[in-house]
Amino acid sequence: MVRNFKEVWLLAAINAIAMCSVPMMMLIGSIIGAELAPDEELATLPIAMMVIGTALGVIPATRSMQHLGRKRALLLFVLLGICACLTLGEAMVRSSFSLFCFGAGVLGATIAALQQIRFAAMECVPQTDGPTAASIIMCAGIVAAFLGPELALAGQHLTSVDYQGSFWLGAGCLLVGGILLLFYVPAAQHQTHTTSGGRSTGALLASPTLLLAIIAGASAFMVMSFVMTATPISMHLHQGYSLNDTKWVIQSHIAAMYLPSLFTPWLFRFLNIRGLMLAGLACYCVTIVIGLVDASVMGYWGQLVLLGIGWNFLFVSGTALLPMAYKDGEQFRAQALNDTVIFSSQAIASLSAGLAISTVSWHALLLFCLLPMGILLALLAWQRVVPSRVSGQI
């Protein structure tokens, strides 16, 4: 039986607290990497390992939820995340770059499981309220985005080893999230431990609706990660702007990624899923235009704010569309396929951004983003032509 929004708000609180380790790592991961790495070119490897760990952790996470249920699997991965944070702290004690990268990868697997919270929330409400539930979970990212970096700084000198305390605080957040999970009651229809059934992966991919949901999420992450990862290098090293200016631009970008979730439920009512995807693509287009004509600090700020808003529109709309593409018993396979493609795309973008910004111009990097955007736009146009094959109202 479908439940009310009480469980959605509980899941949002869990997500807000447990996900603090992500912005924490985004802030200090490269700084620590630069201190520990044998070569400064490897400074961003811990962040890349976290993203790769997320991509590789999607299938184990979804299969665990399929066999154990949402609640037990989430508790298991929260425990894994606590171990990962403690490993990161121990890496600081030993000044071990390899151990630090390993801990970052394991933390990424936990993030993959926590990303499934948005699907758990959508299962707690009627399908018509799915976009609202997804937006509430996304709003929780606002808390994590601001709390995570604060915890990183608060724990910097908590012990005699710099930043060890930061990861202890990260482990504490995961522990609190795990305690709150004990009060979570999954939607009744998804407590059965179905291990098979439904269409194959190939048959699922034949669904235009599923394909559109996946491409929307993948293009959102690919463009966002590609531009965001390269921005500090372009701003600080190439343009010579201060670290404070660069930090302000990145912080504004993170806020812009999550703040739109406060009003996306209302936008869904006026624009529907297709309209919100087009709005996201429009934001990305303006991002590129600003980047091509304005290299000032405010130009970078405008680019990154619109980049965050566009990411939110595309990711939330893709998430809301996904349940329309599968039947009962297929949700875990479809969700695993969706997140594997999305976070693999993010990993590729994160790994290639540094190479791209060092070999081509900022303008060329921005123009490259037109490729995934064009694919999504073409798919939206194609679905206009074949509405009879689309399940669900978009």
Image (spheres, helix red, strand yellow):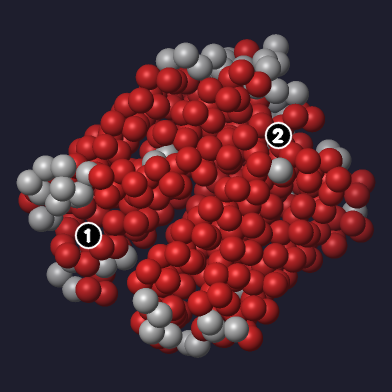
Spot occupied by residue 290 in the image (x, y as percentages of width and height)? 64, 78
**Going 34% across and 57% down the picture, which residue do you hit?**
27
Within 10 Å of the Cα at label 2, are there few (<14), some (14-19), or many (20+) other Cα atoms?
many
Which of the pair 327/189 is nearer the observer? 189
Q: Quadrant of residue 136?
A: top right
**Going 20% across and 49% down the picture, which residue do you hit?**
156
User: Which part of the image, by quadrant, shows the C terminus?
Assistant: top right
Q: Secondary structure at mark 2?
A: helix
Spot occupied by residue 246 in the image (x, y as percentages of width and height)? 42, 70
Left or right of 257? Residue 209 is right
Q: Is residue 199 above or below residue 218?
A: above
Left or right of 258? Residue 42 is left
Specify which label sits upstream in the sequence, 1 or 2.
1
Spot occupied by residue 103 in the image (x, y as percentages of width and height)? 25, 46
- Residue 247: image tag: none
**Going 42% across and 33% down the picture, which residue do you hit?**
17
Which of the pair 121/245 is nearer the observer? 245
The answer to whether one can see residue 22 in this image is: no
Question: Please, what is the three-letter code of the amino acid marked with disc 2?
Answer: Thr
**Going 79% across and 66% down the picture, which residue do you hit?**
378
Spot occupied by residue 77 in the image (x, y as percentages of width and height)? 37, 31
Q: Secondary structure at mark 1?
A: helix
Q: Quadrant of residue 300?
A: bottom right
Which of the pair 171/107 is nearer the observer? 171
Q: Is residue 337 above or below residue 218?
A: above
Q: Which residue is the site of mark 1?
A: 32
The answer to whether one can see residue 212 in this image is: yes
Question: Please, what is the three-letter code of the amino acid marked with disc 1?
Answer: Ile
Left or right of 382? Residue 116 is left
Q: Which residue is the site of mark 2?
A: 132
User: Which part of the image, by quadrant, shows the N terminus?
Assistant: top right
